């Protein structure tokens, strides 16, 4: 079993981005700038946004954080969103970007699916002709992931499974590549995984824990201790897909700043 190290790969990509940003600045170009909007004080969101700002500093981007309290009015929040949307939009959830991605045109790809593709490619994992099962049909991960895995660059045969799929255990066990994005801690057990499969765990559910200072820990959608021994490759939680999601947002920001893709 090979552990897919998202921290290591994201660090490599950040180093590559930093070099490109250095070149842009030396040529007198515009420094990429990423803005974030944060409402309230949700712990998970606070942490995620703090990491985004730190990532921007590491690669030489500018960053802005726009904070609002829980009692912000809808009108105030929408006004800020409209203001920021007047700049080029690097959000892979935006309908135009989603449409361009589906028909194979250059686009800003949703960060988590893009990060997963990077992991598969950089680890040299063979995908062509393989059976891929994506567990989860969200617009954030499941749907774009299924499209990307079916396109010519990856060439897998894709099944999208979900909570209403009949014989879900058997469907998952047929996968050469299993991507778990259902949002249910340790949902995928050993009997749902084929011997030698590649398992990508997208889950990041905060659960109570007496073992950490914060009082919680992150758990994935895969029961790691059971499943890992059956896999050829597997991502851990944390340290797998998570860092790749953040670095993919940096990639999209750089593409927008250098006008390589237009929304």
Image (cartoon, rainbow, N blue to C red):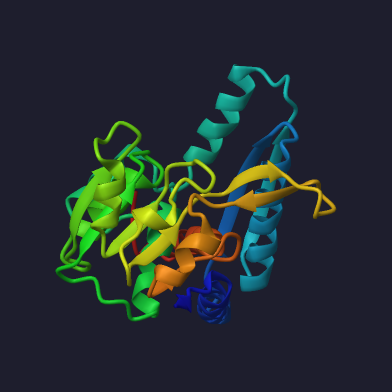
Q: Is residue 99 left or right of residue 217?
A: left
- Residue 94's place in the image compared with 131, above or below, is above
Quadrant housing the N terminus: bottom left
Q: Is residue 144 visible?
A: no
Above or below, 153 relative to 212: below
Q: Picture quarter containing residue 81?
A: top right
Q: Position of residue 44 (x, y in %)?
A: 68, 44
Residue under the image location 48 percent in, 54 percent down: 222
What x and y, as percent, mark residue 9?
Answer: 51, 76
Q: Residue at x 35, y 59 (%)?
A: 193
Image vertical order of residue 215 relative to residue 40, above or below:
below
Name the outermost residue toward the front.
191
Among the 4 quarters of the image, the one containing residue 94: top left
Left or right side of 238 for 147: left
Furthest residue toward right: 213
Residue 252 seen from this side: yes
As drawn, is 211 to the left or to the right of 173? right
Depth check: give the residue in front, 189 or 19: 189
Q: Is residue 135 left or right of residue 32?
A: left
* Residue toward you, 200 or 47: 200
* Rendered position, 184 above or below 249: above
Tell me which residue sits at (30%, 52%) in the image. Answer: 172
**Total numbered labels placed on residues in the image:** 0
Write the residue at 54% across / 65% down.
236
Q: Position of residue 252 (x, y in %)?
A: 44, 59
**Residue 242 in the image, given as x and y percentages of width and height:** 55, 59
């Amino acid at each position: 079993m090979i552990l897919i190290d998202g921290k290591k790969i994201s660090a490599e990509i950040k180093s590559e981005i930093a070099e490109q940003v250095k070149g842009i600045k030396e040529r007198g170009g515009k420094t990429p700038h990423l803005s974030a909007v944060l409402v309230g004080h949700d712990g998970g969101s606070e942490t995620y946004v703090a990491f985004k700002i730190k990532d921007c500093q590491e690669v030489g981007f500018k960053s802005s954080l726009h904070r609002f309290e829980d009692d912000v009015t809808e009108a105030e929040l929408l006004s800020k969103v409209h203001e920021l949307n007047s700049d080029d939009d690097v959000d892979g959830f935006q309908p135009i970007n989603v449409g361009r991605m589906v028909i194979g045109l250059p686009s800003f790809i949703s960060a988590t699916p893009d990060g997963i593709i990077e992991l598969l490619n950089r680890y040299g994992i063979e995908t062509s002709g393989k059976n891929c099962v994506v567990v989860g049909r969200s617009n954030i991960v499941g749907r774009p992931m299924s499209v990307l895995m079916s396109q010519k660059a990856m060439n897998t045969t894709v099944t999208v499974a979900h909570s209403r799929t009949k014989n879900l255990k058997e469907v998952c066990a047929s996968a050469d590549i299993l991507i778990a994005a259902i949002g249910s801690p340790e949902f995928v057990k050993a009997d749902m995984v084929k011997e030698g499969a590649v398992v990508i765990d997208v889950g990041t559910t905060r659960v109570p824990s007496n073992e950490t200072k914060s009082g919680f820990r992150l758990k994935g959608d895969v029961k790691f201790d059971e499943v890992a021994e059956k896999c050829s490759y597997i991502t851990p939680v944390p340290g797998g897909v998570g860092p790749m999601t953040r670095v993919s947002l940096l990639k999209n920001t750089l593409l927008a700043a250098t006008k390589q893709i237009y929304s």
